[in-house]
């Protein structure tokens, strides 16, 4: 007996896009026999894959590749033009968050309204109400009309309600875009909880760090077709080549270097907590010697501000790099405040007169913290005295 809970077989989905729009009713009377012209847009084309029970499947691809359409077809929001879909178990879609919200009602009233739409009884919503408000970080806004909420606040509220609906399969479409780092950390904690409980999850995201962190397997979509499938690392690499061009990301020696991050348990990660132990590992596969090279890791924020740099210059002598190997830097205390960070790589000769390799943002990672209200890059280590 198959342990697949989702089976997608030869699924195709097309949409008709009108070439011209009849904006007024009189257009239908003036030109009653004029046929409307349409262009056909193929959103999905002969898509085939299965999902096993308890699997965390990632779906990535550029905008317009068919990711969201695929989730809507699986959740029966759209019907496919051809092919079949089999789903075993209760499915909870996190797709059109906030559908059914009434902007004239308060946040509290909308919690009960949206909960009913999701199939929760009034008693179930009442028992979960405090958890919903706490998770959405909207304490003090319960009696505020929803029309006075920002779009981010509305989506956070909708997400917080949706996670209370218990199911076997969860479809998550770009849920990491609904809040700041604090809220994203809650989302990550929820992912870990669902995964530990053996839930089946399909996760669509543009955050490659989250994809590599959580997904057991990844599917790459391009123009409605599957262009890659396999481990997160391999498929993310293929996605990068597809998005930026193979020559651009792997010119010269660059393709011979990869960078990975590990925690103290030797698990490859891209999401860490402040003060963790972290190992930065540079893997190389070269065909010619690099004599007495120096290696720099430059850590920056999203805006390009340099947070710190790590260098072998005058601290660690490397005779040469040749063939296949690895060199690592161990961070005993990742003393960074919550944010997303990027690591760039520079490899140059002993006298700093020749640059062998320069790769901007070869790796990104996120840092979270249990402490709130801290600002800046670092947290000073010390103690208060009186």
Image: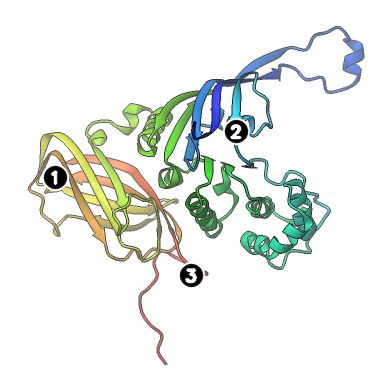
Q: Nearer the viewer, mark 1 or mark 3?
A: 3
Q: Residue at x 53, y 60 (%)?
A: 182
- Where residue 104 appears, as percent x and y from the top left, is 83, 53
> Mark 3–mark 2 contact, CB under 8 Å?
no
Is residue 190 rendered to the left or right of residue 377? right
- Colour pattern: rainbow
* Residue on which the image places disc 2: 87
Q: Which residue is mark 1?
A: 349
Precedes in sequence: disc 3 or disc 2:
2
Quote the CA–CA distance across marks 2 and 1.
57 Å
Q: Secondary structure at mark 2?
A: strand
Q: Is residue 384 above or below residue 209?
A: below
The local secondary structure at tag 1 comes to loop
Which residue is the site of mark 3? 371
Q: CA distance from mark 3 to mark 2?
A: 41 Å
Tag 3 secondary structure? loop
């Amino acid at each position: 007996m198959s342990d697949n809970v989702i089976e997608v077989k030869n699924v195709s989905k097309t949409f008709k896009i009108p070439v011209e729009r009849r904006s007024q009713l009189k257009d239908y009377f003036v030109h009653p026999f004029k046929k409307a012209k349409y262009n056909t847009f193929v959103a999905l084309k002969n898509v085939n894959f299965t999902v096993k029970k308890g699997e965390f499947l990632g779906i990535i691809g550029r905008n317009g590749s068919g990711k969201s359409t695929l989730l809507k077809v699986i959740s029966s929001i759209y019907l496919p033009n051809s092919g079949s879909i089999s789903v075993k178990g209760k499915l909870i879609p996190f797709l059109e968050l906030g559908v059914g919200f009434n902007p004239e009602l308060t946040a509290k009233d909308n919690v009960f309204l949206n909960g009913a739409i999701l199939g929760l009884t009034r008693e179930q919503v009442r028992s979960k109400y405090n958890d919903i408000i706490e998770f959405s970080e909207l304490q003090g806004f319960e009696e505020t009309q929803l029309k006075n909420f920002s779009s981010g606040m509305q989506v956070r509220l909708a997400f917080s309600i949706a996670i209370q609906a218990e199911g076997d399969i969860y479809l998550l479409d770009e849920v990491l875009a609904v809040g700041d780092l604090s809220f994203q950390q809650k989302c990550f904690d929820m992912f870990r909880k669902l995964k530990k409980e053996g839930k089946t999850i399909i996760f669509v995201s543009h955050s490659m760090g989250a994809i590599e962190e959580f997904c057991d397997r990844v599917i790459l979509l391009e123009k409605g077709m599957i262009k890659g499938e396999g481990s997160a690392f391999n498929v993310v690499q293929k996605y990068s080549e597809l998005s930026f061009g193979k020559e651009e990301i792997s010119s010269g020696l660059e393709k011979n270097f990869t960078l990975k991050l590990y925690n103290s348990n030797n698990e490859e990660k891209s999401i860490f907590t402040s003060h963790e132990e972290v190992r930065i590992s540079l893997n190389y596969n070269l065909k010619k010697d690099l004599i007495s090279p120096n290696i720099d890791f430059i850590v920056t924020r999203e805006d390009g501000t340099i947070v710190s740099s790590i260098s072998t210059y005058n601290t660690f002598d490397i005779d040469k790099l040749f063939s296949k190997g690895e060199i690592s830097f161990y961070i005993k205390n990742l003393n960074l405040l919550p944010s997303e960070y990027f690591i760039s790589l520079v490899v140059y000769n002993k006298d700093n007169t020749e640059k062998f390799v320069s790769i901007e943002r070869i790796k990104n990672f996120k840092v979270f913290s249990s402490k709130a209200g801290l600002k800046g890059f670092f947290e000073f280590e010390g103690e208060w005295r009186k």
